[in-house]
């Protein structure tokens, strides 16, 4: 198995909407308001995140992308972010934190009806991510 670079993503986010503690953990929704990946990342998606008592965040996003040549793609990511409590506090406070100080990884799945990109329907990708005060940046790699 080899990793092949697929794309660099920047996902711009609204402030966190905290729904409170449930039996699963602290539920948060973070709306996606735009971004890019060598093409626009369309508004309208969100991260339906669960924050667990130990500070671990379970990531579950859905968003729509438009490629440089007009194709529309649905992108779903699932992943996990965790780290030392002091690092997670700094992230939550909106501080710039070196991504080497915490673990943030994603699985990426794509869906499209555009024939030019249908190969993505049958491709799994993984990503290494970083959280900034108002965005998430990640590098995605296909699993070949």
Image: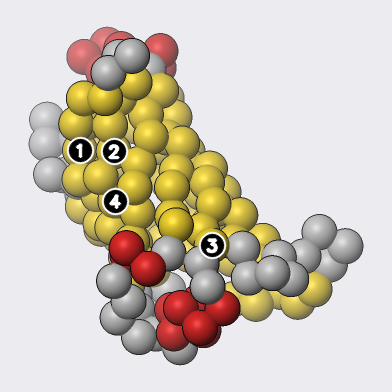
Q: Residue at x 46, y 36 (%)?
A: 107
* Tag 1 near tag 2, CB within 8 Å: yes
Q: Which residue is drawn at 37% across and 29% down?
A: 125
Left or right of 116 in this view: 63: right
Rendering quarter of residue 18: bottom right
The image's mark for residue 82 is: 3
* Tag 2 near tag 4, CB within 8 Å: yes
SS class of the residue under badge 4?
strand
Closest to the camera, between mark 3 and mark 1, is: 3
Q: Which residue is drawn at 28% across and 58% down?
A: 137
Q: Name the residue under label 4.
A: 138
Query: How many neighbours does mark 1 have within 10 angstroms: few (below 14), some (14-19), or many (20 or more)?
Result: few
For the image, the number of numbered tags is 4
Instruction: Estimate the x, y position of residue 124 in percent, counting from the top left.
Output: 41, 23
Closest to the camera, between mark 3 and mark 4, is: 3
As rendered, which of 41 and 26 lies closer to the eye? 26
* Disc on the earlier residue, 2 or 3: 3
Disc 3 from disc 1: Cα separation: 23 Å
Q: Which colour scheme is used?
A: secondary structure
**Is residue 74 at least partly visible in the picture?**
no
Rendering quarter of residue 64: top left
Disc 2 from disc 3: Cα separation: 19 Å
Rendering quarter of residue 111: top left
Q: Mark 2 points at which residue?
A: 140
* Disc on the earlier residue, 4 or 1: 1
* Disc on the earlier residue, 3 or 4: 3
Disc 4 from disc 1: Cα separation: 8 Å
């Amino acid at each position: 198995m080899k990793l092949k670079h697929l794309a660099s993503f920047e996902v711009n986010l609204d402030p966190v909407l905290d729904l409170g503690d449930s039996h699963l953990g602290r539920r948060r929704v973070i709306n996606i308001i735009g971004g890019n990946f060598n093409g626009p990342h369309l508004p309208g998606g969100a991260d339906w995140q669960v924050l667990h008592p130990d500070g671990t965040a379970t990531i579950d996003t859905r968003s729509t992308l438009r490629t440089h040549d007009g194709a529309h793609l649905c992108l779903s990511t699932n992943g996990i972010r965790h780290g030392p409590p002091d690092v997670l506090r700094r992230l939550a406070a909106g501080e710039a934190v070196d991504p080497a100080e915490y673990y943030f990884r994603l699985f990426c799945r794509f869906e499209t009806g555009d024939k030019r990109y249908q190969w993505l329907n049958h491709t799994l990708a993984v990503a290494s991510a970083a959280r900034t005060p108002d965005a998430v940046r990640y590098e995605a790699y296909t699993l070949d």
